[in-house]
């Protein structure tokens, strides 16, 4: 196709050169007029009026605009007609053109020019109101706003989108942050999703929420205020508290110190000395005798002790547990009783709902359990025989959840020490038995135990002979089976299935797992368990040695039960 108006373009360029020599003051105008298809630009009318107001030559201005006209929109329309004639569907053509335009806009978008156009219009451009009615163009605005958060035109577009009722589509904190209504709607939607989703999806919703909220200090503060002000029923309060604590933990993980805000929301700010002591330790991520003495002084005085929930800070509890149960940690003997008191008080004391006074019934027993377990776990270089003697005592101590968590931490630090299996591998069974006891006593600690068993199962032990390594991995599989038998079923099965797919476990170990599980489960099987366990059983390389010809073995019976359920489901549908 011949390029339109070629002669006029050359003619105009000659005239422009003469004009620029005559009068430099009009150069800016003629530069604007000489842009390709300048006559189609939104602000060209105003620019031409300014040109005339400055006594510009009307004829030369018109010739400049006419000379720069190429008609690209018309060329595009002609190509669209050609594509339609070639057999493309209208929707397909529309999609191709739209995607190409979006690509060009993303590539060449200039926020300064966009703001200039926006301010020159003086009112909401009609084209902008029309664009936000289409989801594909709204998506383009979201991408641009993420890339250019300071652009005024895009901020206004976000407000228009929010006002038009599409605020639910805005999922980026940096995009929604500049529009309070949009951000509030986004926070509300995510909170509702967390409150109503299934148990297994809570953590997924929580990740989405933390990514949204821990954007900066303002979004964090706003969201904590919203959560704090919600009128929750008793059934939701625990979830609400968990969400607030997860936000704090995530913020700390991103090296953002939100300690003071978190303490204020707990009400600790009404006790100045207590606030300062807790803030100092949490901000430095370390306990110290001086601040712990202040905590002890406040809570030991039962006549005026602060509410116990001030101490229910996961970060603080973790620091205390690490102080007592992490190998190598040391506590000043002169202050050890104060540390024990604060930890025991925080986990065993509660206020009566009616009279408000703290109930101390379990305080002394909890203190004794913590102290006893601490003495055993702090013995460096204890022999296998010495530890074996103490196992029954630890079994009694881990009945207290706080001691159980401490023992899990102690076992974790001990078994993950690179030197442990080189120097004291024979003691590993004692530590793993302690995990079994904790799993049997405390369901809420199952995820922590599973994570530790995963690390051990996936670990490498080059210092051990191959046969000893195989026996150790088989032993770890036995402990995974025990964890499953204690109620942590799906996470354990899903982990073994993942090991099978990734080749992280020897087939003999997976076969051992399948054998042991089939011995302790029975029909009818839940849909979730069946779908998770079936891939393991269907793997012929794993289960072929476990079957017999008359199909009465556990593997065959499990497959038959799954087949019957599948047929019943098909009949119902």
Image (cartoon, rainbow, N blue to C red):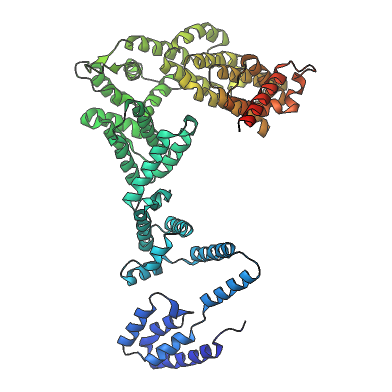
Figure quadrant of the N terminus: bottom right
Residue 38, given in percent of the width and then of the height, sits at 45, 79
Q: Quadrant of the C terminus?
A: top right
- Asked where in the image residue 466 lies, by quadrant, the reply is top right
In the figure, residue 114 lies in which quadrant?
A: bottom left
Position of residue 274 measured from the top left corner of the image (x, y, whole percent):
25, 27
For the residue pair 235 and 425, the one nearer the viewer reads as 235
Question: In x, y percent, where is residue 524?
Answer: 60, 19
Tell me the residue at 40%/74% (across/down): 42
| Residue at (35, 26) in percent of width and height | 235
Residue situated in front as seen by the camera: 71 or 543: 71
**Residue 416 visible in the displayed image:** no
Instruction: Single out the residue that lies furthest toward the right.
Output: 549
Q: Residue at x 78, y 17 (%)?
A: 548
313 over 69 or under it: above or below = above
Q: Using the rendered image of the protein, determine whether residue 113 is visible from the camera's viewpoint.
A: yes
Closer to the camera, 447 or 168? Answer: 168
Q: Is residue 146 above or below residue 326?
A: below
Answer left or right for 466 relative to 130: right
Say whether residue 382 is left or right of residue 230: right
The reply, left or right, for residue 532 in relation to residue 278 is right
Rendered view: 540 above or below 116: above
């Amino acid at each position: 196709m011949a390029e339109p108006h070629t002669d006029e373009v050359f003619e105009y360029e000659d005239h422009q050169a003469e004009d620029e020599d005559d009068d430099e003051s009009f150069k800016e105008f003629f530069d604007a007029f000489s842009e390709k298809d300048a006559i189609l630009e939104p602000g060209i009318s105003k620019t031409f009026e300014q040109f005339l107001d400055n006594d510009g030559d009307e004829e030369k201005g018109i010739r400049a605009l006419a000379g720069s006209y190429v008609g690209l929109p018309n060329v595009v329309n002609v190509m669209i007609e050609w594509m339609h004639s070639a057999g493309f569907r209208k929707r397909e053509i529309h999609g191709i053109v739209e995607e190409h335009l979006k690509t060009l806009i993303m590539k060449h978008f200039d926020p300064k020019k966009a703001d200039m156009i926006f301010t020159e219009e003086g009112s909401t451009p009609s084209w902008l109101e029309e664009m936000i009615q289409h989801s594909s163009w709204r998506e383009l605005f979201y991408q641009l706003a993420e890339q250019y958060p300071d652009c005024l035109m895009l901020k206004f577009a976000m407000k228009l989108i929010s006002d038009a009722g599409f605020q639910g589509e805005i999922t980026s904190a940096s995009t929604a942050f500049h529009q309070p209504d949009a951000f509030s709607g986004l926070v509300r939607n995510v909170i509702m999703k967390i409150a109503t989703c299934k148990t297994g999806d809570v953590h997924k919703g929580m990740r989405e929420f933390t990514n949204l909220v821990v954007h900066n200090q303002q979004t964090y503060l706003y969201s904590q205020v919203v959560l704090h002000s919600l009128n929750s029923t008793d059934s939701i309060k625990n979830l609400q508290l968990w969400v607030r604590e997860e936000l704090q933990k995530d913020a700390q993980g991103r090296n953002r110190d939100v300690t003071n805000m978190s303490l204020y929301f707990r009400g600790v700010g009404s006790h100045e000395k207590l606030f300062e002591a807790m803030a100092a330790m949490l901000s430095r991520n370390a306990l110290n005798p001086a601040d712990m003495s202040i905590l002890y002084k406040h809570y030991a005085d039962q006549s005026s002790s602060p509410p116990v929930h001030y101490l229910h800070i996961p970060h603080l509890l973790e620091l205390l547990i690490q102080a007592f149960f992490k190998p190598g940690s040391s506590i000043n003997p002169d202050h050890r009783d104060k540390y024990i008191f604060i930890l025991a008080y925080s986990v065993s004391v509660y206020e009566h709902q009616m009279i408000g006074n703290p109930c101390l019934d379990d305080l002394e027993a909890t203190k004794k359990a913590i102290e006893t377990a601490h003495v055993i776990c702090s013995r460096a270089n204890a022999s296998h025989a010495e530890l074996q003697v103490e196992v029954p005592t630890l079994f009694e101590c881990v009945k207290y959840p706080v001691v159980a968590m401490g023992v899990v931490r102690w076992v974790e630090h001990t078994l993950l020490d690179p030197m442990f299996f080189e120097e004291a591998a024979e003691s590993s069974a004692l530590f793993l038995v302690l995990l079994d006891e904790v799993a049997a006593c405390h369901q809420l600690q199952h995820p922590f135990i599973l994570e530790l068993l995963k690390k051990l199962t996936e670990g490498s032990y080059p210092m051990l002979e191959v046969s000893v390594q195989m026996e150790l991995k088989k032993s770890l599989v036995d402990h995974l089976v025990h964890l499953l038998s204690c109620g942590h079923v799906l996470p354990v099965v899903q982990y073994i299935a993942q090991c099978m797919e990734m080749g992280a476990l020897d087939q003999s170990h997976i076969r051992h797992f399948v054998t042991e599980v089939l011995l302790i489960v029975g029909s009818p099987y839940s849909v979730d368990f069946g779908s998770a366990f079936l891939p393991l059983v269907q793997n012929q390389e794993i289960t072929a040695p476990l079957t017999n010809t008359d199909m009465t073995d556990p593997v065959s019976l499990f497959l038959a039960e799954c087949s019957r359920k599948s047929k019943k489901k098909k009949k119902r549908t």
